[in-house]
Amino acid sequence: MRIFIAFEGSFEPFDVSADETVEAVKLMIKDYFHIPLSEDEQGRWYLELMYAGAALKDSWNLADVGISFGSTLKCFVKEEDKPTLYVFNAVTQETMPMMENISLLGKKVSDLRTLVALRCGFPVSVFCLRTPEGLEMYDCNTLRDYQTDIGTTLRLDVWDGWKEFLMGCLLGQKLKVQRYLSTEGPVLKYQKKVALYIAAFYGYIELTEWALKQGVRPEEAVGVHPCRAWCHEALHADVSKCPIHAAAEAGQLLILKAFVNCSVLCLECKNAAGQIPLTVAFKHKHKDCVLYLLSKMWSTVSFPKISVPMRIYIKIKQWVLRAQSHNLNKSLLCGARVFGAKVGDTVMVDGFTTPKMTTKSWNKARYKDSQSTVGKLPPLREDTASRKPVNPLAISQQDARQQTLKLPPLVDANTFSELQRHQQQHQKKITATARKKEKLIKNTYLPQVPLPPVSRVDYSHPSFYYATPRADFLLKSSLAWFSEHSGKTPRENAIYCLAVAR
């Protein structure tokens, strides 16, 4: 059977059998046209045959796909890039290929985390990346610092006890999200923001409505975990992203409409790069979202006697909210309320504290402390297994006497008095040491050079009185001292001051 192959402007006949596979035909074409095909770490080059507009798989037979005598097949040389890196998601147990340029290996870890967040839908403050050896990768370092090569598989870990919560967010299951919420106030508030962010990214309407009813604002940044809120200088730039930005990135039109109906301030909400949702949607080429946001941005807000453009209305509303928050902060400061981290709060220092992003399950993270404190029963003796079952009613009186509880012997009277004397001596030593320490502290803070009891005669200021017997005496003595040191009477000084003032 003769068929024709069209390749790069040439049209050549090939004699093949009807039951020939597509893979065998590709080998014939490769040898006939001397096509160099290769494969390396960055990618591979391969042949692709097309018939009637469809690509043919290597395992198919020509007769099975309707190729007959005189049919024409098109042949192309295609290049397939291999993933630069792989990221294993410990929550979903899936491996994400990162199809980026090889220059990614020379960039910082923060850039890779931004790309991973766009792929999995997690906020950057929820997860961390680890090397295959389990070493945590910090944003300030480059991938080369961790000996990361092409094809390396990194691991994505989340906060301990958050695995089930995040899985509920990814699936849009509101009941599961509610079940695994934290009981701590700051962590609970942060989890609700994360839930709204993920729901906006994946377009879950029910979960979005629940989060909005809980008081989460779509124009409010997700932020970071409370135990990292104090180290804001080293945080990732994308922690300032809001749920409205996630919806614009993913092209979720219904979520955008719900957010704008909730608050028009979402239209002017900016991320770390200064981009509003309209700019983000335009960057990711979501045409329907761009048209909707444009229509909202250029609309007007009508009042009984005036119509205001949306941009001006948003500015006015921002000014009002800023003034309200300023007054609220002043009132809270007057009440001496403490903001931010407080004494006793848990903080996390990179490289020093025990890592809390190891993707432990909710049960393991919750009962870790309780399991460590539970007492363990002693192991059974080896001869227990070899014993025969004994009737408890057949125990002899001698065995019963041996099993009775034995109390420790009484302490001798002389020994007791000696212990009491040692205890009293030890208490006296402690008291003497405390007195010496107190005396040493007093001597330390005493002045080393004694001060004179009375000031010198030629001192320019009047003597200081430690006690004032009568107010009239203090007034008369002050006037006398003023006349003595200034050379003027109080009346003359008053006339002089009035003259200078005029």
Image (tube, helix red, strand yellow):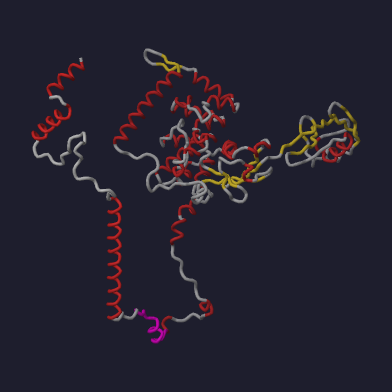
Q: Which of 17 and 409 is in front in this view?
A: 409
- The reply, left or right, for residue 396 in relation to residue 159 is left
Q: Does the magenta stretch include residue 322?
A: no
Q: Nearer the viewer, residue 32 or 446?
A: 446
Q: Quadrant of residue 429?
A: bottom left
Residue 92 visible (yes or no): no
**Location of residue 107 with respect to 352 vertically, above or below:** above
Q: Quadrant of residue 369?
A: bottom left
- The reply, left or right, for residue 19 in relation to residue 452 is right
Stretch in magenta:
395-407
Residue 125 visible (yes or no): yes
- Identify the residue shown where x is 76% and y is 41%: 40
Image quadrant holding the C terminus, namely: top left
- Identify the residue shown where x is 87% and y is 35%: 34
Give the percent coordinates (x, y) of residue 235.
50, 38
Give the percent coordinates (x, y) of residue 271.
51, 30
Q: Quadrant of residue 410?
A: bottom left
Give the percent coordinates (x, y) of residue 116.
59, 39
